Amino acid sequence: MTRVPGLLFGGDYNAEQWPEEMWPEDAALMRAAGVNLVTVGVFGWSRLEPAEGVYAFDWLDRLLDVLHEHSIAVDLATATASPPAWLVRRYPEMLPVTADGVRLEFGSRQHYCPSSPVFRQAAARLVERLADRYHDHPAVAMWHIHNEYGDHVTECFCPISAADFRSWLRRRYRTLDALNSAWGTAFWSQHYSDWSHIEPPRTAPGPRNPTQQLDWQRFSSDALLECYRAEKSVLDRYSGAVPVTTNFMSMFRSLDYWAMAAEEDVVSDDAYPDPADPQAHVHAAMNYDLMRSLRHGAPWLLMEHAASAVSWRPVNVPKSADLSRLWSLQTVARGADGVLFFQWRASVAGAEKFHSALLPHRGTSSRGWAQTTRLGADLQRLAEVADSRVPTEVAVVLDWHNWWALELDEHPSSRMRWLDIVRAWYEPLYTRNLPVRFMPPGADLTGVRLVLAPNLYLCEPDTAHWLARYVDGGGHLVVGPFSGVVDRDDRVHQGGAPGPLEDLLGIAVDEWWPLADGAVTRLAAADDADPDRYRHATTWAEWVEAGTADPIARYADGELASVPAITRNHRGGGTAWYVGCGLDTRGLDTLLGDCLDAANVTRGRTPRGVEAVRRLGADVEYLFLLNHNTEPATVGQLSPAGVDLLTGRPSGSEIELPARGAAVLRRPLRTEADSPLRTDGAVDRPGTGTGEGWV
């Protein structure tokens, strides 16, 4: 990941907020805490370029030298997330505009239009100067472009963006006839006879054209990607050997992270699970699985999280010491090779002065400092885990274009939200200790025993063929409701849903039947011994007609009584399930458990609330055991036994974890004769596992 050995530990060091005489003290404290990497200069543009074309790097020279003298490596930021006041006042046209026509003012951050040539050129000039000066500085171990693209401004509706949008559309469609056809402009007399007539989907009297909105989402994501590319191209010219990243924001709707991650050297994430949310660690695990998946299973970097409380929720609940440690170790368990925080020293002014830090306002006398030094020692003990991989057997299909399309206006139900759906499908995997790999349509499915597609509202024929080849080859597939409805232009497939998935799933959908809030429809399983195993449907239902598929559950009451709700289609060497309804928590858990059994997916058995994740090295495995309960838990039947890297003690066949405690067991890597998993986490072919636990 970087030239820094072991696991990375540190955080944002906003040294420009502090007198220079404090820098050596900070660096010495970093060393004492085990910090080996800090991010520098994220919001330093006004200090680096106090006036147009006037650069002041002397302070940064001294800062990097101080850090290097203390053996602290630097993730050097390009500082472009907060343009300075002089730039905004000289070029006010670069400020972003909302869909209602309001121009957003200076005084926060990310106050720029992504399409603004003024902003892009000024940013590129600054990056050029930074790269030229620091590309071979011995402290610089990583470049950090911008900060949290899209956090405050994901889209801009100004005339500059409108012109850029039209250029983007010209490249996509080439002709107005093609655009009119794709957008369905015969509806409501929306036909365009000149490119200049097209504007962004600003606030309108009623519903806006859905394909225009979908293309706008694509364009807005691409516009921010172009900002990133412009900076990275400069860094690559000067500093190709130093890895480049930009920090993501977990499962973020507005940006296509597949496209962005393809151009990163290291994926990094900012994660802020809420201590007040009892399910926060489950949702965090899903986000971390995504980060690992974005670069095909390679280790990633937790760029930011909170040592205790944040400052931007309505109620900012702090983390207990054990929770802060546990959640940090969870990121390593799920593939992170570094744990960084926002920030090193707590600010005394500004919007984030009440945000926690590794060095709190009370300094080394604080409870937080004790937490910092303990975590630093823990990560040093886990140094050998770096660069190992998390094996997976289950894949979840994630397509940002589908996400955007699913949540357009004027749908049968606004309750069909991607994040809600995928979280519900992820939880049964999490409770069975099954990390997943998220995949875009068309990805390599080698080694995957079970593919889950919680929703494929937007489904192209290529996606259907990709899934069909997987099932024909012996794979197991589960597709969720409201799938196969539209093509890439949000046009309904002729013949209705599930469109190109019809042959694969062996069903046809006659009508969607969304359920009112609070309404339920009882299901009757085909299993006479347990007819209530899938309980009932909530939120969504469909009138499904089974063709080659076998109904395994039907609606038991209401207008849909006796209509298939869940089907299973045997095809080639594999099986494709269709879930035509919104199952409740227990019903979805039961169904996915059945599908996992059918696919012979290997899982680890632990007490409820104990998370188990494996990372595999060349000849050793690391078993992370994380107790999310507020009482102790015992994990037994550990085979083979190992050594707990956090304590140095052997584990034996049983280990007791304190409340919110953790263990990381180094164990011999089992051979294929002992386990269905290969060392790379793949399987020889789907369906050959035993389904037995590995804990």
Image (spheres, rainbow, N blue to C red):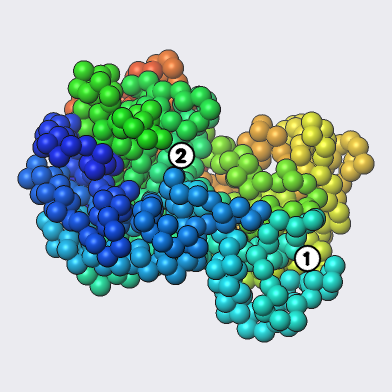
Where on the picture, by quarter, is residue 398? bottom right
SS at circle 1: loop
User: Horizontal and vertical percent for residue 412?
Assistant: 80, 50
Q: Estimate how packed mark 1 is, as few (under 14), some (14 to 19) or many (20 or more) residues with alpha carbons within 10 Å.
A: some
Displayed quadrant of residue 302: top left
Horizontal and vertical percent for residue 165? 59, 70
Across and down, in percent, residue 236 comes to: 27, 69
- The residue closer to the viewer here, 34 or 422, is 34
Residue drawn at (75%, 67%), measured in percent from left and top?
491
From the top left corner, tell me how far across and down residue 478 is, in percent: 64, 51
Residue 193 position (above or below residue 47): below
Above/below status of 632 relative to 153: above
Asked if residue 244 lies left or right of residue 271, the reply is left
Q: Residues within 10 Å of mark 2 (few under 14, many from 20)?
A: many
- Residue 239 in sight here: no
Residue placed furthest toward the left: 69
Residue 548 vertical position relative to residue 24 in the rendered view, above or below: below
Looking at the picture, tell me which residue is in the foreground, 78 or 247.
78
Query: In front of the other: label 2 or label 1?
Result: 1
Q: Residue at x 36, y 53 (%)?
A: 84
Question: What's the residue type where badge 2 is placed?
Answer: Ala
Whether residue 283 is visible to the viewer of this picture, yes or no, is: yes
**The furthest residue to the top:** 631
Identify the residue position indicated by label 1 in the image: 492
**Quadrant assignment, res 594:** top right
Q: Count the numbered circles shown.
A: 2
Residue visible at 46% across and 38% down in the picture: 284
Residue 588 vs residue 335: left or right?
A: right
CA distance for labels 2 and 1: 35 Å
Image quadrant for the N terminus? bottom left
Identify the disc placed on residue 612: none
Q: Which mark is residue 285?
A: 2
